[in-house]
Image (tube, rainbow, N blue to C red):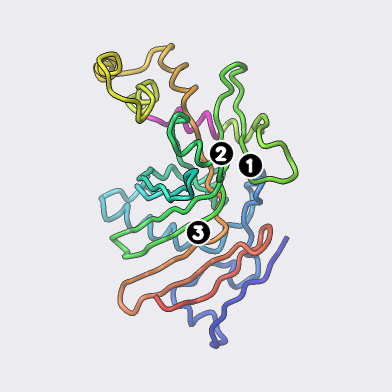
Amino acid sequence: MNGSHSHSHSHSHDDDLGEVTHPAMHTNNGRRAPPAAHNLDVMPPLWLSFFNRSATAESQSQGDTNRIGSYPFTLATVDETGFPRARTCMFRGFLGNNNSGLLKVTTDRRMAKMDQLTNKPVFEACFYFPASMTQFRFSGTVRMLYLDRSTNKVMLEDRTSTVMEPLQEASNELAEAFNSSWEELSPAMKLSFCKPAPGRQLTDETAELLDTIEQKTSPNADDIKEGQSNFVLLILNPSEVDYVNVKGVGQRLKFVNTEEYVWTFEQFAP
């Protein structure tokens, strides 16, 4: 599906946007991965070139010129009382071919945010890249991939859909994404999923378990089995992206997913 783009200012040329260079803005192909997250071979969303540019500049400022790295960002959810809960997470790249615009985050299924996302599968995420002085605020819905402990199959939990069961076996593509995300973790990170449940009160027993894990250099087979059972891959599916560049006169663009595959944007004062 092709969709037209729009901007609300009175100028008649896209060149007035300065940094807007994404070809989709000039060809009316502002497409994105669909909410079901199964078709990943699509045109990248309009905001992705901005994000990649900022992320690349950040990597280069840290001496890494070969790739876009993993970046800390703030992920906010909503608890059962309606209060926001924020924490720092690590961005693990995009799902599929990196054009999907679906952000990957790893977490422990025993953490409080899992219950929060089950009850309210919405999020806001905020990135700031000092090298380019740019900020990206994402908001949208979340899907979760984790192992069924009885069958060892990768399950997709999607409580945003109105046309399918909230919990079902993941597609081969999503199961592969889950398994590869686990394999990409360092040995120390894999062992961290064997620790006592996050937030559990520290006792002599839990302290001893922490000391045992701390002394290991790599997980054994039992550690891997336990760690994988606690491992979760979150898929953040943005519906709005607020981009702000505060360098010089600045620039602010708000990208909105108006319908499946279609993104529009408007300009605002930074």
The quadrant in which residue 2 appears is bottom right
Considering every residue shown, the one lying at the far front of the view is 81
Q: Is residue 63 magenta?
A: no
- Closer-to-camera residue (35/26): 35
Q: In the rendering, which numbered label is found on residue 48?
A: 3
Amino acid type, callout 2: Thr
- Closer-to-camera residue (229/30): 229
The quadrant in which residue 259 appears is bottom right
Question: What residue span does the magenta drawing correspond to?
Answer: 177-186
| Residue of label 2 | 118
Mark 1 crowdedness (10 Å alpha carbons): few <14, some 14-19, many ≥20: many
Amino acid type, callout 3: Leu
Q: In the rendering, which numbered label is found on residue 116?
A: none
Q: Nearer the viewer, mark 1 or mark 3?
A: 1
State whether the magenta stretch is mostly helix, strand or loop.
helix
- Residue 8 lies, in percent from the top left, at 56, 80
CB atoms of marks 2 and 3 within 8 Å = no
Residue for point 41% across, 47% down: 85
CB atoms of marks 1 and 2 within 8 Å = yes
Is residue 32 shown above or below 217?
below
State left or right for residue 119 relative to residue 69.
Answer: right
- Residue 164 lies, in percent from the top left, at 73, 40
| Residue of label 1 | 159
Residue for point 32% across, 64% down: 132
Amino acid type, callout 1: Arg
Name the image quarter holding the C terminus: bottom left
